[in-house]
Image (cartoon, rainbow, N blue to C red):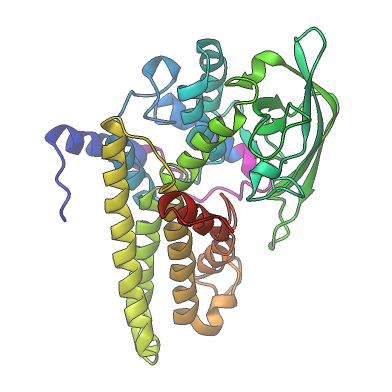
Amino acid sequence: MELNFTSEQQAFRQQVRQWLAAHVPAEPLASFDTAAGFQQHRDWEATLNKGRWGMVTWPEDLGGRGCDLIEWLIFEEEYWRAGAPLRVNQNGIFLLGPTLMEYGTDAQKAEILPKMATGEEVWAQGWSEPGAGSDMAAIRSRADLSEDGSHYVINGQKTWSTRAVWADQCFGMFRTDPESKRHRGLTFILVPLNLEGITVRPIPQLDGLPGFAEIFFDNVKVPVERRLGGEGEGWQVAMATAGFERGLMLRSPARFQETARRLVQLYRDNRESADRDPAIRDRVLRAYMDAESYCLTTYQTASRLMAGGKIGAESSTNKIFWSELDRNMHATAMSILGARAELLPHAPDAEGVGTWLDGWLFSQSGPIYAGTNEIQRNIIAERMLGMPRV
């Protein structure tokens, strides 16, 4: 299969490429799991917004360019090719943003999306709980409606909330019907993290930096206007968000294509030692082909959505594919580098290979976040293949 782009799409690609060449920082930003790096990435979001590149698919009056999904994929290809910074507000722009477009009121869109686009408000995800990880139907955190119906009173705990240490807001599901079970009685609520009664406790990653956090809610009052969708309809709203997370926007194919290109170059630079294991060459070829396959599948998904389709249970197959692809590519890089793979980026003899160790460590989380791959296989079995639930 060969993708053919229209002259308008090719012109758009050139526009993106030229802007990024003029604005991408010459030196990498500090990790956004540090206070200084978080602010640097927030500033980069503001720079993107000035060029209206923060989220190109949003309407122009909300800070976007009104682009379609094909143009978004083109933008992503150029973004990753340019080596631009990672998006610190990915939970907001890639997950909550599209969900707001579908379920938000006009007032919610006007209030939230422009601040999200500029990086003024960075969002964390508040789904997982100590007893409810991939199985979100087990959520127990409560949101009780006040007697006058003006606000919810939230009590409970969320955990593994990415970016929550320095984020401004979080979105999550809370049980608003105490008698309900499983998927029923859940409501999707948007919560400012500076409210009285909220405690954010950092969780260190393998590298010691606080990439995650626990969020504790102690009688936190949230206006009812912060509800997204109807009361008790949180599962439906969350499944739309999960569809964007697993099936399209959180991990664009350009991310993996860029890793595959780097892997090919790494193999070429170390071919003499790498070819001592005949399997490595085949693994590099497989990684490149799989990255291209994922790209073509995503273009197909985007075309289907533009024609009025929806993201369904098949998003689980995508999530398994890209998470295992990422892990396999970085494992192959570790095999090529041998003992040098253990060098951290700042080690004197790293010579640039230390970024592979960072990538390999992060890739181990891919089969876990956005719903574990075991849960995704259950979804595929039940909802796509029609197999009975055991």
Q: Is residue 136 left or right of residue 282?
A: right
Q: In this view, does 177 lie to the left or right of 277?
A: right
Question: What residue is shown at x 67% (from left), y 35% (from top)?
Answer: 167
**In the rendered image, is residue 162 in sight?**
no
Q: Is 212 in front, or is 43?
A: 212
Whether residue 390 is situated above or below residue 161 in the rendered picture: below
Q: Is 128 in front, or is 108?
A: 128
**Image coordinates for residue 63, horizontal then vertical, percent:** 43, 21
Question: What residue is shown at x 56% (from left), y 69% (from top)?
Answer: 357
Whether residue 112 is situated above or below residue 171 in the rendered picture: above
Tell how many labels.
Answer: 0
Question: What residue is shown at x 26% (from left), y 34% (from top)?
Answer: 15
Magenta range: 21-39
Asked which quadrant contains residue 139, the reply is top right
Q: Locate the C terminus and report the quarter of the image it occupies.
A: bottom right
Whether residue 196 is situated above or below residue 7 in the rendered picture: above
Q: Is residue 280 left or right of residue 133?
A: left
Q: Is residue 239 covered in magenta?
A: no
Question: What residue is shown at x 44% (from left), y 80% (from top)?
Answer: 336
**Image coordinates for residue 197, horizontal then vertical, percent:** 86, 28
**Image coordinates for residue 164, horizontal then vertical, percent:** 69, 40
Asked which quadrant contains residue 360, the reply is bottom right
Q: Is 84 in front, or is 58?
A: 58
Q: Is 26 in front, or is 40?
A: 40
**Image coordinates for residue 85, horizontal then vertical, percent:** 48, 46
Q: Locate the N terminus and report the quarter of the image it occupies.
A: bottom left
Q: Is residue 8 left or right of residue 51?
A: left
